[in-house]
Amino acid sequence: MRYDGSAGNALLSLIAFYGTANRPNGMKKNGENSMYQDTKAAREILRAQQPNGLWGLFHTLGEPKKAPLSTEQALRRLQILGYTISDEPIGRTVHFMEDCLKGKRQMPDRREKTHNWDLFTDLMLATWVRRFTLSVPAANAVAEKWAAVIGAAFSAGEYRQPDYVRAYRNVFGIEPKGPRFKDFVSFYQVSLLQNTLPPDLEEMLVDYILHHPAGIYYIYDRPMGSAYLNVLPEAFASKKASRYLGAMELLIPYRHGRSKLRFAADWLLENRDENGFWDMGGAVRDQVYFPLSDSWRKEETRIQDCSYRVRRWLAEFSAEEPADAI
């Protein structure tokens, strides 16, 4: 279903209800622990962490028997379970990534040849550092470079690919090579650019991403022409809807682009059950976004997890200031 741009006014007060004054139980704030930090899944991930802060390789999966997770997979799962920079395991990993950005350490992954590996590793590292903290200059420097490229790409008031290529060449000194760089709409760039752009550019960027035919690479990417984010999933209780919500979670920190996401808030509120809760179904159990609790044997536990995630998004949507990274 393609959203036509109209917002249901009857839902506005309900959206406001899920603001910061109605933060879901267990949502981490001001150093408090998340209700999901001490789950079995979290403990298993933490036990596998190496002394240097990594989990095997960083971007690629190594030997599954020795390291069943990559470092990126572990970071994503722990962040979803409520871990932040204030938690020692995350701080240890961020320190390793900062050292890599400074040239003091090297990424353990094998160099990929389909794109500029050094540029890609800087992009990955800076993105993950900034998902937990904005106080690392080396990561912020990478974000500023990308902000300059994107600013130039939209300098005419709309996105223009030739302007993007020209700015990319000027900033990085090379031509964009490979799908991750020829098209910037991927998890890394979209996450990295949060808290770097002026208000008008934020709004243009969010609008452009919503109308991007291939979705967001790594998050909600399907064949060209079938992943428009302004087209809602057919079924709410589905893996597709969970991944779609993942894309909305990536866009919600763009405070000045939030008005463009009103349709997503309406969609979520319209999919509550008669008791005011959400259930995305058992199929969304992907070991990334779900489950949050140890077990979904009880239906009410699944509903609790789904409702927690939706309410968290709605709370950030209605917040006057950007909430902490999730």
Image (tube, grey):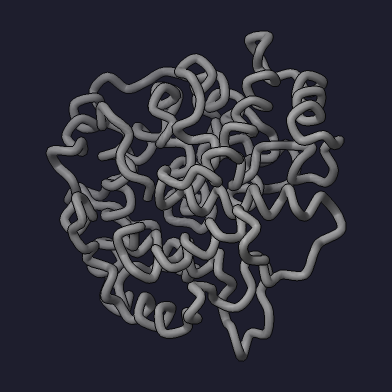
Q: Which of 175 and 101 is in front in this view?
A: 101
Q: Quadrant of residue 152?
A: top right
Q: In this view, does 273 lie above or below 322?
A: below
User: Is 324 on the left or on the right of 219, as rendered?
Assistant: left
Q: Nearer the viewer, residue 102 or 289?
A: 102
Residue 266 visible in image: yes
| Residue for point 76% across, 30% down | 168
Residue 14 at what x, y percent from top left? 20, 32
Q: Which residue lies furthest to the front in this view?
A: 104
| Residue for point 57% across, 30% down | 210
| Residue for point 41% across, 36% down | 252
Residue 7 at what x, y percent from top left? 36, 21
Q: Nearer the viewer, residue 92 or 5?
A: 92
Q: Which residue lies furthest to the left in this view?
A: 21
Q: Residue furthest top?
A: 156
Q: Quadrant of residue 44?
A: bottom left
Q: In which quarter of the image is residue 255?
A: top left
User: Is 68 on the left or on the right of 32, as rendered?
Assistant: right
Residue 185 at what x, y percent from top left? 65, 38
